[in-house]
Structures are given as structure tokens and as C-alpha cells.
Amino acid sequence: MTARLIDGNALAAQVRGELAARAEALKAQGVVPCLAVILVGEDPASAVYVRNKVAACEKAGVRSIKDTYAADVNPRTVFDRIAELNADPSVHGILVQLPLPKHFDADAILEAIAPEKDVDGFHAENVGALMQGNPRFIPCTPYGVMKMLESANVPLKGAEAVIVGRSNIVGKPMAMLLLQAGCTVTVCHSQTKDLAFHTQRADILVAAVGRPRMITGDMVKPGAAVIDVGINRLQSGPDAGKLCGDVDFESCKEVAGVITPVPGGVGPMTITMLLTNTLESAERAAEEMS
């Protein structure tokens, strides 16, 4: 058996087409959806992510503001800029690209963003709302994963879901969303004993731990939905320099029912759901104006 592929690029293109139509409808009401992105430092991966986000905004009809700062910038400068963006009614979403330089308090920076403009869904107020099942913004990567499961018609109610990774960005919010969808959820991490015992029971397996090809075919339940959130660049061996996920795709695709590739899987959906959150924020602003 070879797993059915969930094509993140194709799904993202479909959703972004719908977002472009929503953006045009907002502009007809006099509201131009706008996302502000702050990049601190010269991290190459962060620069690529920001460039991709700005390009996606342009294609979806969303105005973007990009502010870049040197790695040694005084954090107060960034705090002051966030305050300006918070106060600007034409800005509907604000994100600060992570990671930040070591002299920054990342949590304090994220908390400085107004909750109603926190389109990443990282502010404590938005995290709490998600926990209560009434989210203002759903964190973008877990949101994208849920859309992918929906597109593949993966049954959620009563399913055994196992998440490998417990980060605030993916693992924890992913657990909340699957729990609210009716799954029985297990969260595994670096202290988990006998990881394979848990993954082999999973109807839905989400790998988000940042270790290349950690999940192998013998760890997967036949017919399971395998979602690979990881993105790693191999440092050695015959595939050195290539991108891969946390899932060993070749062995897992022979066991799973559906699977996401890397690249071209969850990644495109993460940016798409960032745009979705920005549009939702702009639509709320338009309602308040009417």
C-alpha cells in the first residue's frame, strides 16, 4: 500500500484564491487588509520566511509592511515600533519573526503585540482563548494541519491522535485543536519512554520535533494519517544539503493511509493560514466600522 499524498501546495493555492476574493470584497468596503512583519537580525532562514510571507501577501491582495532591524538593535526600538503598529487602525495583523537575538525577551515582545492583531496566535490571551475552545486566532501551523486533515477527509471524532513534540508553536495548540475535534490525544516528547508504543496506536500522527527522519515506517499504524511538520536540512550523507521532515517519507508512505511531503506539505499551509488570520482580523475591523 502506498499512502495518498496531501499536496500542501495545491491546497494552499485553492485557499489563497478564496482569500484574494475576500480581500477584494473588503477593499470594496474601503478596508485594505494589512499585515506588518518585523524581522530582527540576519538569520538566513528567517529572511527567506519573511520574503515568502511578503510575496504571499501581494498575491492575495493583502498590503504588507516589512520592518527590518540589525541584530544588535536596542529592544526598546522594536517595542516602540510594535506600539505604533498597535495604534494604527490600518494594520490588521502584526508578527515578529522568530527566533530573535539572544538579548531580546521573546515572550515580552510577543506579549507587546495587541491580542486583536496577534495573527500568529502566540499572545497569552489568545492562547487562553484557544484552550477554552473559543479562539480569536488559531496558530498558523496547527490551523494548516487541521485544514489538510479536513481536505483529505480524515475522520477525527474518536480517533487516536499522537503528537510528537510539545512546543508552544505547534505541539500544544495542535493537541488542543485535535482534542476539540473529538480525538483522544497523546503528546509525546523527549522524555517519553518507548515512543514507538505510542505512535503505533495513532490513527493520526503529527511529527513536530525537529529531528530529521525520526519517524520510520515501523513506528506507523497501517492506514494512519501522517502529518510531517518538521523541516530540516541534512548535514551529511548522500542527501547532504537536501530538505527533509521529521518523518522518513520513503518507509512511512508504504504504511500510512495519507501522508504529507517535505517540502510541499505543511509549509505552504502555514503561510496560507497566516493570511487567513489577517483577513479575519480585517473583516472584524470592517464590521466594527459599519
Image (spheres, grey):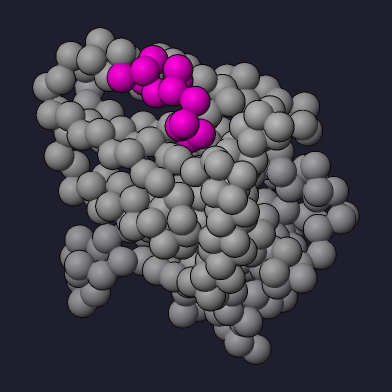
Asked whether residue 260 appears in the rendered view, the answer is no
Q: Residue at x 30, y 47 (%)?
A: 50
Magenta span: 81-93
Does the segment drawn in magenta span residue 90?
yes
Q: Residue at x 60, y 87 (%)?
A: 2
Q: Can you tell which quarter of the image residue 83 is in?
A: top left
State the image coordinates of residue 10 (x, y, percent, origin top left).
53, 75
Q: Can you tell which quarter of the image residue 39 is in?
A: top left
**Is 121 drawn above or below residue 228 in the view shown?**
above
**Closer-to-camera residue (38/197):** 38
Q: Residue at x 70, y 69 (%)?
A: 151
Asked whether residue 36 appears in the rendered view, the answer is yes
Does the segment drawn in magenta span residue 117?
no
State the image coordinates of residue 100 (x, y, percent, origin top left).
27, 29
**Is 114 drawn above or below residue 290 in the view shown?**
above
Quadrant containing the N terminus in the rendered view: bottom right
Residue 108 appears left or right of 257? left
